[in-house]
Image (cartoon, grey):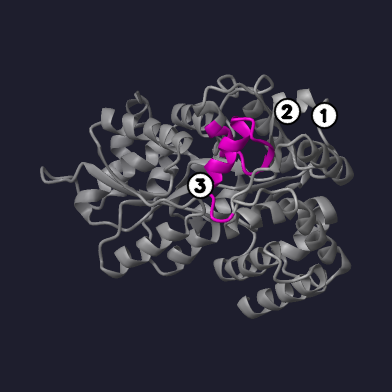
Amino acid sequence: MFKRYKNIGLASAFAAFVAAPLSATADDSVEVLHWWTSGGEAAALNVLKDNLESDGVSWNDMPVAGGGGEQAMTVLRARVTAGNAPTAVQMLGFDILDWAREGKLADLNDLARAENWDAVVPDALQGFAKHDGKWISAPVNVHSTNWVWANKAIFDELNLSTPRTWDQLVSALDKIQAAGYTAVAHGGQPWQEATIFDAVVMSTGGPAFYQRALIDLDDSALRSRTMRTVFERMAILRGYVDDNFSGRDWNLATAMVINKQAGVQFMGDWAKGEFINADKVPNRDFLCFRFPGTTQQVTFNADQFAMFAVSGDRQGAQAKLASAILDPSFQSAFNVVKGSVPARTDVSDGAFDACGKKGMAQLAAANNSGNLFGSFAHGHAAPAAVKNAGYDVITAHFNGEYDAAAAAEEFADAVADAK
């Protein structure tokens, strides 16, 4: 339960945050739109719901299934167009800034100042949590996307060590497939293929190439021989998925690894929440390691709750929600369950398991060494129009519509048209 409000003077923050004192008709409820509907995600979200309800704030849940959030954004647009925005919406990267530019988001500066968010939230996250110097969202976590999740029993059975290079990865996948398992658990959805694409770009070209190609959107990098190699490697990985992958949700692919049906999954660290929800333990039941060739780099996204401009009677509950999200106790409790790491730099790793401790240490090291990069697949490298155009080419290639050379040219053309 959260008791820190009395320690930081939240009442004073509310007075600044709300233009006039709350009346007896204040709405002590929040409506939250999100796409956290899998078992591990729902368990993590319940931490926030329970803590808010203990502070007298009712939670009106508005889940919209779909792991990449595309369906949720469609629902949101309809709600805002109808003049009925939710209190808060789970959102990623450039999507937050797009809504801020439309003038639809609340001003959280007074609350952020009272709680000193500037000092504890990493600059990379603040780049998406602030617009024109104004806090507009509350960061929940930092996810890193270039993880591999492996079934330890299969690795032990086949005497496989953790692959560190592309060739070692291919060798391991060959052995897993030859033993009768699905080598790569995958769900055939554009955002999932793009998640793998991020890792393959970083692994193949290194951080400087990733920066040029997926963040700077440099045309020569996008049309380079290196990018053709990226698509060649994506085609190789396509050969290790099962025949029923099309349309599979990401958590069902994770379940294949959990249930010893598949050897590995290339997925962000939200996958760990599914292992934990299934009572699995790192290094006993499953392994977590970086995609080969990216051991020094971290590609990230950060779930945030964008706070929409709401009427005065709803602002007090909205401020409580924003404050609760940044509370250090919640940041620890939530991220332990979710599989991600805290959005604050001052949270202890004491409650985290082996994968969580590894993730926190690697995130800090990558941030300090200049190896922390926004994920293209998850809207933290390029604006949504570019991301979505890239999705179309990546998934078309994955499904055999283009060879590698054609895919690189189509990808470059799509990016150029979307910029």
Evaluate if marks 3 and 2 touch, with contact meaning CB atoms under 8 Å apart. no
CA separation, marks 1 and 2? 8 Å
Name the image quarter holding residue 190.
bottom right
Q: Mark 2 points at which residue?
A: 154
Q: Is-magenta flag for residue 182?
A: no
Q: Which of marks 1 and 3 is in front?
A: 1
- Callout 2: few (<14), some (14-19), or many (20+) C-alpha neighbours within 10 Å? many
- Three-letter code for the amino acid on which mark 3 is drawn: Asp
Relative to 94, residue 371 above or below? above
Hey, which quadrant is residue 171 in on the image? top right
As drawn, the label of residue 160 is 1
Disc 1 to disc 3, C-alpha distance: 34 Å
- Residues under numbered marks 1 and 2 in contact, where contact means CB atoms less than 8 Å apart: yes
Q: Position of residue 231 (x, y in %)?
A: 78, 62
Which of disc 2 and disc 1 is earlier in sequence?
2
Amino acid tagged 1: Leu
Magenta region, residue range: 246-274
Disc number at residue 303?
3
Q: Which residue is pictured at 41% across the width and 37% down the height?
A: 42
Residue at the left extreme of this rendering: 24
Which sits in the foreground, 42 or 27?
Answer: 42
Q: Where is residue 323 in the image (x, y as percent from the top left)?
A: 38, 38
Residue found 53% across the figure and 41% down from its top:
251
